[in-house]
Structure formats: structure tokens, C-alpha cells
Amino acid sequence: MSNRWIQPGDNVDITNERKKCTFDIEKMSAFIHGGEDKLQRRREILEYVKSNKSLGDPQPIEFMTRNERVENASRKIVEMTNNTDQIDGSDFFGEGMYYQALTMGRDLHAMSLHYVMFIPTLQGQTDDEQLDHWLSLAIARAIVGTYAQTELGHGTNLSKLETTAHYDPKTEEFVLNSPTITAAKWWPGALGKSSNYAVVVAQLYTQGECKGPHPFIVQLREMDTHKPLKGITLGDIGPKLGINGSDNGFLLFDHVRIPRRHMLMRYSKVLPDGTYIKPQHSKLGYGTMVFVRSIMIKDQASQLGAASTIAIRYASVRRQGEIIPNSGEVQILDYQTQQYRLFPQLARAFAFLFAAYEIRDLYMKVTEQLTHGNTELLPEIHALSSGLKSVVSWDTAQGIEQCRLACGGHGYSQASAFPEIYGYAVGGCTYEGENIVMLQQVARFLMKAAEEVKKGSANLAEICAYIGRKGEQHSRFTSVDSYRDEDIVSDLEYVARQQVFRAYEKLRKAQQQANSETAWNSCSVELCKTSRWHVRLYLVKNFLAKVSTAPSDLRAVLHDVARLYAFDIITSSSGNFYENGYMREDQMNEIREGVYKCLHRIRPNAVSLVDSWDYDDRELKSVLGRRDGNVYPALLEWAKQSPLNKTEVLPTFDKYLGPMMREAKSKL
Amino acid sequence: MSNRWIQPGDNVDITNERKKCTFDIEKMSAFIHGGEDKLQRRREILEYVKSNKSLGDPQPIEFMTRNERVENASRKIVEMTNNTDQIDGSDFFGEGMYYQALTMGRDLHAMSLHYVMFIPTLQGQTDDEQLDHWLSLAIARAIVGTYAQTELGHGTNLSKLETTAHYDPKTEEFVLNSPTITAAKWWPGALGKSSNYAVVVAQLYTQGECKGPHPFIVQLREMDTHKPLKGITLGDIGPKLGINGSDNGFLLFDHVRIPRRHMLMRYSKVLPDGTYIKPQHSKLGYGTMVFVRSIMIKDQASQLGAASTIAIRYASVRRQGEIIPNSGEVQILDYQTQQYRLFPQLARAFAFLFAAYEIRDLYMKVTEQLTHGNTELLPEIHALSSGLKSVVSWDTAQGIEQCRLACGGHGYSQASAFPEIYGYAVGGCTYEGENIVMLQQVARFLMKAAEEVKKGSANLAEICAYIGRKGEQHSRFTSVDSYRDEDIVSDLEYVARQQVFRAYEKLRKAQQQANSETAWNSCSVELCKTSRWHVRLYLVKNFLAKVSTAPSDLRAVLHDVARLYAFDIITSSSGNFYENGYMREDQMNEIREGVYKCLHRIRPNAVSLVDSWDYDDRELKSVLGRRDGNVYPALLEWAKQSPLNKTEVLPTFDKYLGPMMREAKSKL
Ligand SMILES: Cc1cc2nc3c(=O)[nH]c(=O)nc-3n(C[C@H](O)[C@H](O)[C@H](O)COP(=O)(O)OP(=O)(O)OC[C@H]3O[C@@H](n4cnc5c(N)ncnc54)[C@H](O)[C@@H]3O)c2cc1C
Ligand SMILES: Cc1cc2nc3c(=O)[nH]c(=O)nc-3n(C[C@H](O)[C@H](O)[C@H](O)COP(=O)(O)OP(=O)(O)OC[C@H]3O[C@@H](n4cnc5c(N)ncnc54)[C@H](O)[C@@H]3O)c2cc1C
């Protein structure tokens, strides 16, 4: 079988790995990326990005100061958006994300919020007239906008945002104000220096009453000079764990007046005289949220896939230590401990990617249903996507760190790209809904379902049907070989269901002793666990189902990966499976051996499995993860570019270390 | 009770927390830091550091470029070491570490390896004549040295280092050479730009034979000009996840000649004619290693303590969301999920600190025994300290991230200090022995012990005695209240012992099918688990024992913390305790409730518990963790210093964004 990943001059070890591959990599890539046509398009986009020198970095961004990073990112994003005709603009989930990843990397930029939040909010929240006006400006890039919701004092609890928008019927204007320091908008991407517009969420006051938080479109800076408008104070919030190419910003209003029609009026309205018109539907925003989540989940999967690619490739070229004395150093990929560190991360990346596809499809199904006024599936899918967001972002963060640590010392260098990947990805645990808060939202949904099951009134969609099923009393497991997908799912359903009702009973008992909210709080750790099991069950089920749709010659290897994912979950929480004698120790021991068997079976295909994710070096930006495996000379080349190496002797010698040593010498 | 942590102008919420404290904070601080005299000395050192302006930073280092950081750190370390008369130089574990933490923070510096590795290596590896010569130079700071062992291609497997030192009897010199690119020394702290000397580990060749890796002292740069000597190429290895004030470096030799007596000759020697004299004792280096580990463990505990302090203080001033509707926003510390995120981290910090003390004491005991030629305890303590290093560094890293995430968005900002704390601490998983490699070393020791027990020939010291004990068949647990310390220990011993013999049996079986090394590899995941249980058992036992020595009025609150630590371990691995019917589900459920009870009991003392770790703001360097709790205005002040805010309008507007918008406008 020809293998496009093998090229002359490559490291011999990595080439040998690739030669061991037992499946058709191109077919696998097509399966991973949703079809041969999609794969073809990826290659075209890559060629274009490589051919356009202006889309590249003059030097690795790790060597730039923050100001240089911000400037470099601005340059690239303008160039990138000058050339959007290179991609199918309607396919952000596929082509758009890939184009952006290749060009912008993981450092974000002046327009990240413009595309991800500003434009979608305009699309979702403006009335027709407003849409006409603002959307064309935004899409043409005549203005740069961001989404300013979070404040210094409030992120999660939006109902307590402090920025006010008082309606003044005399002038038909809103007066935006930040009455306290904690009212300062804080965090919005590209707010500090880049944007000249923002959707600002503020407490609407009209006719003496507070109507809660509403979105307004606000000009922040003069069009010509880019100076902040009168009454507006704004700036960058400083360096962060990651995304330092983005100027996340702060913003304070001192009685800034904006026209009435700058309130986004698709749902709520304020009439010229100040009369407030309530919104008709409330849950419609859910749809967009689900879509954004599907993108986030895909992005997380892609970061974990990248981390796995780097670490697995490096483990194939790194030789360290001998297994059998005097028989030569082995590739560290041969150590069972190394496989146990890395392969489950790759399995997770697959599980998360396939979940992202499924959520996107569900989103489209729901959107379709919504056009017929059917909102039935919405709560389940909203809950699922919130739960996935939490579980996926946290498992991804942990997985990236495992990959990094598995590269030993070199993983700690920014040359590995891990510090950047981690900083970028782990943000996902916090934004778009703080994870622990999200898990509790999911739990509310699950407790409602449990309540309905108890009352016999449940009408649960497929995703939750397990809660209402009776299920087995004992695991059907007899041997790893005969452990069918449906047995695995049945075992996970048992545990997920158990946990739902354990939490439900705990909550009911607590509610007999305290008010319902205090009771909730006293059960909240168990409730979060419940949500996690709900999500894990979904992830396993969806992964196994997806594998069963793969071309038959890919199924065996993918099945090993999916089983590793499931077995790892089961054995890491053995206690849950032992409860009520559901599973026996001998069964668990066999599944544990199953983990090691999966590692062993995946081993020869490991490099090819990550190759088939189709990351170009351009996207990985990692010296350790290079396709060609020629890691060591590249590390040296990379290091030579360090700004500290620009002069042979640093000023520290003349100023501090030299005098210190001379003085010491003179005294000896 | 007076409370030095309460001051006028403080945030009201944090003051109220402090008023709730049920114990004597000063007494607790003294207990934590090893006595009232030690606490007093901390305060004196703090005053001194605060009074010496040159020991401070002109601006937070987060806003500096890497070159500025390196320069700033060099300036400070010279000033700091100019004033070592301020501390008791013989007490590095206590005063030295504190003085350095206050002054240098977590970014390291030009002389970090000089003190931690260069000088101790000279002390340990030179013969008397060499010691006379080199030690005085190093201590006087007439030279700056580092320890260059790791190479681009080899870190863990020292036996395969590639740097060579060929002895030439004609000139009585060694010729140092880097025959390949992978032979480049890589990682040594302060090697790149600061040091002019290094202990270099190289393969010794004499009389045509390779004698393995040996240490040599090598001059790298000219004394007067600091230019690299002929044949020497060196530089900085580039930016890292953390410690960017340190110039970790690379080093290549092109046939560099050094005098014969630059080989460190305490143990091995090369005579003028090239005759090689073998070392007499081999395990003596262990002692120093144990000492370095005790320092590392204390340092890790201290980082986790700092992270807990920041997050718990912030959780007491952050109000977000309501538990009971319309009754006002609560401090996030009131959420059970928040407590569950944070308090176990604090408990770990205590457990690790107390373990560090114990290892230091054991080290002193062993050193004492060694002077009488008694090496009996050495292997056990070496194994224990290796295991502790691994478990502690990884749990610390995870704990710091939990603390960070628990601060929501603000945790992601470098203002929180978490990114720096994490970057600094997590390096400990890799250096001084890669964690997974260390755990396998511990496992070798445990398997030997198991073998001896099976053979009935075991003579196990206290730390391992549990392996040879019969132990209970069933947990003695009846209720949380009556669950005594010795019952807890007995339960953990059960699981640790089970795991030892499970791994032992698996290994024996595997050895029947393959050679012993392949068998080892196939069991290595289980072997690592075994080591972790060995260490966890030790940590719990030591923590409980330490608490029982606390002043009686501190014991109750410390006991809650210690039990939380133990209960958390037990409930997180319930499966291990269910095995063979050792524990029942109703028992486990009770212990799980015990976790929540501990959280609840710790809640009112949480802020005071972290206060009693006695971190000054100077040491924490965290806007979120400020003693006074006045977080929000300080965040704004911090952000204003961001280099991006130096100009109101960035060049990006004139160069890229402005033209883009103008062109778009013109086309609309
Ligand atoms: C990288 C990044 C980019 C961002 N970009 C934007 C942007 O473009 N625009 C914008 O408007 N915002 C943005 N944000 C802000 C982000 O949306 C908020 O940080 C996020 O919603 C979390 O809110 P918080 O910071 O208030 O956390 P908090 O709510 O303060 O969370 C702190 C802790 O309190 C706990 N907690 C809070 N409420 C509850 C509860 N009810 N029950 C139990 N526990 C609770 C949490 O679990 C957490 O442990 C960004 C943040 C980051 C990190
Ligand atoms: C911040 C930092 C500071 C440092 N400072 C110094 C310094 O001052 N001086 C100096 O000389 N060095 C220094 N080092 C280097 C450090 O000592 C090495 O990185 C460390 O020993 C790990 O070795 P390695 O990098 O070769 O990792 P590797 O051994 O390559 O590890 C990579 C992977 O292989 C696995 N592996 C390797 N061997 C085995 C085995 N036998 N069995 C199973 N798995 C195995 C590991 O578990 C790991 O997952 C520093 C490193 C860092 C990160």
C-alpha cells in the first residue's frame, strides 16, 4: 500500500512504523474527516495556505513579544479574511475551522469574536431592519465587533450584571453606564485594542423598572482614528495562560448615550415612549448555543488529536533505555506505560470528534424541527451538549498534559507546542459556561427525567431512554473476546442509571430536611458525577455506533480504539461496576487485561492512526511532532532562534555577574 | 482571639471569614513551620526582603519580555547572594528556601543550578585537594557553575550519554567531544548564557576502554569577556512552559582539552598513565538524592499550598449566584462543588509538607547511620523518596490546576499567578527522574520485598512492614465517627498489600511466558499502580501521625483535614476496597458522606487554615490571592500595566485593521 506520509530522508524508525500499518490510511483519513471530498478540500486549502506567504509567520511566535504576536495575528487575519473565497463559507464546521487553524494557529486574533460571537449574535438577535444595517457592515469588515457580556464581578450569574442601560424617552436614547468597578466588562476577546464595535449586554431600565440583561450594539472607537469615544475607557486585560495574540479587554462606560435602535430588538423591544415589549419565545437561543458547542467540541477533539499525534510520533523516534539488556535502546512507544499514557488520549480524541459530528447533525435535525414549531428534542440536546462541553474540555486538557509529560524534558519546551496547545484548549473548561456550573444544569435535566420515571410519566428520547429502562441485574460479560458492543453499552447504562437514582434519592432525602435549594447544594458533587456518567455513556455508545458504520477494512483497528476507550472508563471506575454485585472481580480483571490487549494491538498501527488525522506540520507547529521524525536537528535549529541567543554575551554579565565574580576573585 | 491577618480596609467577606476561625492561627503557623522560633525567623526574613528595594521587581514579571526577565533575575540573584548573612546558611530547607522564594519567585535565575547542583556535586564528588580548590571558588561566587548531564538524545538512560572524555596520557588531558548532534548537552539550568563553569557528565575512555559516565569540571567561558572558549558552542534552548527567567542551555564540545585533574576524583580516578581506579562504594550518592528530594517535596507542597491559598481566599470574596432565590449572591466557597474542588488540594498540601519534614528527618537519621557504616535503611528510604517525588509532583500539578479552574475566568489570567505556579511546579514531574520511570524503580523494590515475604525471609523496616503482615479480611469500619486512625491505615494497608501481591503474581505469571524484562514491561502499568499505593499509604499514615503530635487545641481541625485526605483517596478508588468483599457498599457510602461532612466542617476555618501557611503577598504574587481580599480594583490596576496599553491605538490599526475597514466601507 502506498503511504503518502513516508518520504525520502525521513527518520528510519518512523518510516518503519508507517510500513507496519495494516489499513488504508487515505481511507481512514476520509472516514475521519467525513468523506473523500472533504479530505480533498482539506488538501486544497492546505496548498493555498502554503502558497500564500503572507499567511505565514516570519518566525515561530514563541519567540515574539506579546505586542509582536498581536501585530502578527492582526496582519494574518486581515490577509486570511481577504481570501475567504478560497473556502466554502457555508461550511465553517469543516473548511472554515481548518483554514483558520492553518493560518492563525492557537493564539487567536483581532477578529476571533467578530466571527464566532458578534456576527452570530447580530444574526440571532436583531430585527429585520437592524439586520440589514449591521450584518452587511460586519460581514464586509467595515467594522470589527466583539461580544461583551462578562464583567469583572459577574460571569456565570448573568442576572446580576451591573452595566446599566437606562432608557431616556426625551432623547430616545439609552444611557450606558458602569456604576461600579465590578461592572467593568472584562474578558471579551479583541475588546481591548482591536474592535471598534461591541454587542454589550446590560441591564435594561425603562419606565423606572429593570427588565434584566439585554444586548445593545455600541460603537467603542472612532472610525477614523480608532480613539475610544467619549465616556468610554477600555484596554487590554493583560497576559493569560494562552491565546496571547488576542487582546481580551476591559470596558467601562461613563454615561454613554446610544440611539434607541441600538438595542437588538428581535425578541424584546423598547418603544419610543419607553414601553417594554416582552420576548415571545425564550428557548430559541438554545439552537445557536448547541451549534457553538458542536464547534467547540470538534475544536477540542482536534487539539487532543494534535497532542496525541505529536506524542505518538515522538515516542516512535525517541529511543531511551533497553527492555532486554544489551539488545539496544527501544523506542519509548514500546513501553507499556507509555502506551497506557498515550493511546487512551488518542481514543478520546476519536470519541470526541465523532460526538462533535453527531451534535452537529442533531443540531441540524432540531433546527429542521424548529421550523415546524417542534421544540421537543431541544432540552435533551441542549443538556447533552452542555454536558459534552464540560466532559470533553476537561478530558482534553488532561489528555494534552499526559501527552506532554510523556515526551519527558522536551515536552516542557515550547518547541513541543504543548504549552500552547494546553493553554488554548483548557480555556474551554471556563468559557461558554463554566464546567461545574454546566454539569449542574445537565443534572437538573436528569433529575427531572428521574422524577418522571419514578412517576411513570416519562417520555424519554433515545439519549435518556436508559434512565427508564429496567436493564440487567448482572453484567453479561463472560470474556473480552465475546464482549459485544451492546454488552459494553448495557454495563455503562447500568452505572449511569444507578448514579442517576443514587443522586435522585440523596436529593429527595435532603429535601426532606432543608429547602430545595440548600438540598441541591448538599448533593451537588453527586449530581455532577451523575452528569458525567450520562455523558460518558453517550460518548461510548456513539463511538461504537460510529465504528460500526466504518468501511469494513477499517473497522477492526477502530474497534480496538473504541474498546480501549470503553475499557479504560470501566476499569478506572471499577467500584461503580461492583455495586450491588453487578460485576464480579474476575470480570473486571479480564476487562483490565482487555485494556492491555488493546494497547498491544494498537501499537503497530499507532503512528498511522495519528497520521490519518491528517495534520500538516503547518498546523501542528511542533518540533517534536514533525512528520519526518527528524526531531533533534530541528530542536537545535529552533533553539538558535531564541532571542537570548542574538548576542553571545548578555548585558547581565557586564552589569551583574561579571562584577560579582571579579570582586569575589579579588577577595580570595 | 487577635488575628494578624485582619486589617482595616480589608474586604468585608474575608474579614468575616477570619472572624469565624476556631483555632489559634499563630499556633497553627508555628506548627506548620516547625516551631515558634522558625516562624519568627520567617517574619524577620520577610521584613528584610521587603526593606531591601533591590530585591524587588520594578514591575510584575508577567509584563516583561524574556530577555528582561533573565536580566531582572540576574540582578536580583546577585543582590540576594550579596546578603546571605541575613539567613542561617546551614538551614537551606527552611530559611534558604524561604529567602529565595520571597526574592526570586518562581521564575528561576542565573544561579539556580549553582546552588542546587553544582556546589553539592563538588562537595560530593571531588577529592580533598579538588574540594579545596573548587569549592571555595564556587562558594565565593568567583565562578558560576551548572550541572550538565542530560543531552538532546538522553535524559533517563544515563548509561547511553554520548559526550565523550578521552584520556590522553601524553598531555595528561581529557578531550571532551560531542560526536553527534544528539550528544549536545540540553536542559541544564543557566547553562545557556550565565554560567562559566559546569560539571559535565561524559563517557570516560582510557586505555582504549569505555568506563561509563563520569563527572568533569569544565570551564565554558572566558573569565574576563564571558565569551565561549574555543571548541565550545553553547546557547539558550528557548522558551519553556515555565521558569523563563532561567537560561536552560545547550552545549557542544569540539575536542576540548581539560587537565586530568578536572575529572572529579572522589570515587573513581584516572592516574597520569591512564590507569583507571574503580570506585569503592556505589550507593553513597543516594543520601544527597534523598536530601534533594526532601527539598523538592517541600517545594511542591509549598506551591500547592500557595495555589490553595489563592483559590480559597478568592472563593471567599467572589460572590456569584444564589443558593436560595432572592436571598443574595453567595460566596462561591459556599458551593459544595467548590469545596470539593479546593479543600482536598489544601489537604494534599498538608500531607506533602508533613512528608517532606519526615523525609528530611529520615535523611538525617540515615546520614547518621552511614557514618557508622550502616546502610540498612538506605534502599527503603531511597525508594520511598523516589515514589513520593512522583506522586507528590503529579498530585500537586493537578491540584494547582483545580485551584485555577475554580477561580473561573480570572484564574486564566496571569494576574492570578496560577499559570506561573503551574509551569514552575509541573516541571517536577520530569526532572530529578521522570515520574513513570521513578515509579518503576519503586516497584522493583516492592517486588523484592514481596518475593522475600513469599519466601518467608523478609526483614522489612517499618515503611514496608505492611507487606509482610497478615492484616484484616474485612474493614473494621462501622461509622464515620468511630472510624479511628488505625482503622483507616489498616484499610489502606489492605489495598496497598493487595496491589503488591496482585502485581507480583501477574509478574510471576508473565515471567513464565517471556524473559524477565519483557515480562516486567507487560506488567509495568500494574507495577506503577503498586508504587502509588505504597506512597499514598505512607502519606496518609504520616499525616495522621503528625496530627496526633499537634497541640491539642489544633488537633480537631487538622484531623478533619487529614481525614478528608484519607477519605478522598478511599472513595476515589472504591473498587480496590470492594475486592474480596473487604469493604461493603454501605461502608463506602458512609465514607463518601464522611467526605461531605469534612468539607462542611472545614468550611468555616478554610480561610484561616490557608492564612496559617503564612504566605505574604510578596510570595504569592497573585492579585486573586491578596491578603486584603480587595481583588477587583487590583485586577484593574494590574491590567493597566499591560504593555499593550502603553499606546491607546496600536500600530495594527494603521497598518491592517484601519485600511481593511476603510476599503470595505468604500465598497459598500
Ligand atoms: C479565555 C477566555 C475567553 C473569554 N472570552 C469572553 C468573551 O469573549 N466575552 C465574554 O463576555 N466573556 C468571555 N469570557 C468570560 C467567561 O465567559 C467567564 O469567565 C465564564 O463564563 C465563567 O464565569 P466566571 O469567570 O464568572 O466564573 P465564576 O462563576 O466566578 O466561577 C468561579 C467558581 O465558582 C463556581 N460557581 C459559580 N457559580 C456557581 C453555581 N451557581 N453553582 C456552583 N458553583 C458555581 C464555579 O464552578 C467556579 O468554580 C472569557 C473567559 C476566558 C477564560
Ligand atoms: C525544567 C527542567 C529542568 C531541567 N534541568 C536540568 C539540569 O539542570 N541539568 C540536567 O542535566 N538536566 C536537566 N533537565 C533534564 C531532565 O533531567 C530530563 O528531562 C529528565 O531526566 C527526563 O529525561 P528525558 O527528557 O530523557 O525523558 P525520556 O526518558 O525521554 O522520557 C520520555 C518518555 O519515555 C518514558 N521512558 C523513558 N525511559 C523509560 C523506561 N526505562 N521505562 C518506561 N518508560 C520510559 C518516560 O516515562 C516518558 O514518558 C531538566 C528538565 C526540565 C524539564
Image (cartoon, coloured by chain):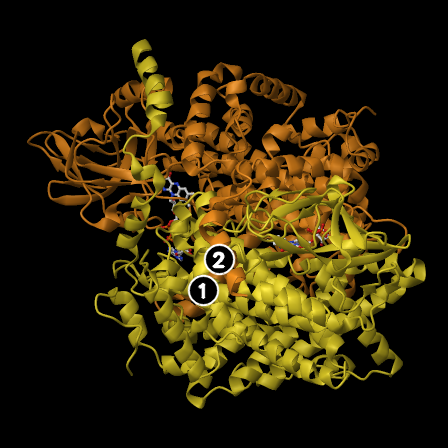
Chain colours: A orange, B yellow
Kindly report which numbered mark, 1 or 2, lies closer to the viewer in this rendering: 2
Q: Say few, some or many: other residues with alpha carbon within 10 Å of mark 1 (under 14 / 14 to 19 / 20 or more).
A: few
Question: Is residue A223 shown left or right of residue A58?
Answer: left
Is there CB contact under 8 Å for labels 1 and 2?
Answer: yes
Three-letter amino acid code of the residue under disc 1: Asn
Q: Residue furthest bottom?
A: B552
Q: Chain of mark 1?
A: B
Q: Quadrant of residue B383?
A: bottom right
Q: Chain of mark 2?
A: A
A268 lies above or below B200: above
Residue B348, horizontal then vertical, whole percent: 53, 69
The residue labelled by disc 1 is: B82
Question: Is residue A236 shown left or right of residue A477?
Answer: left
User: From where the camera sits, is residue A500 visible?
Assistant: no
Q: Nearer the viewer, residue A113 or A216?
A: A113
Residue B493, horizontal then vertical, whole percent: 69, 78
Residue at figure coordinates x 55%, y 36% from the top left: A298
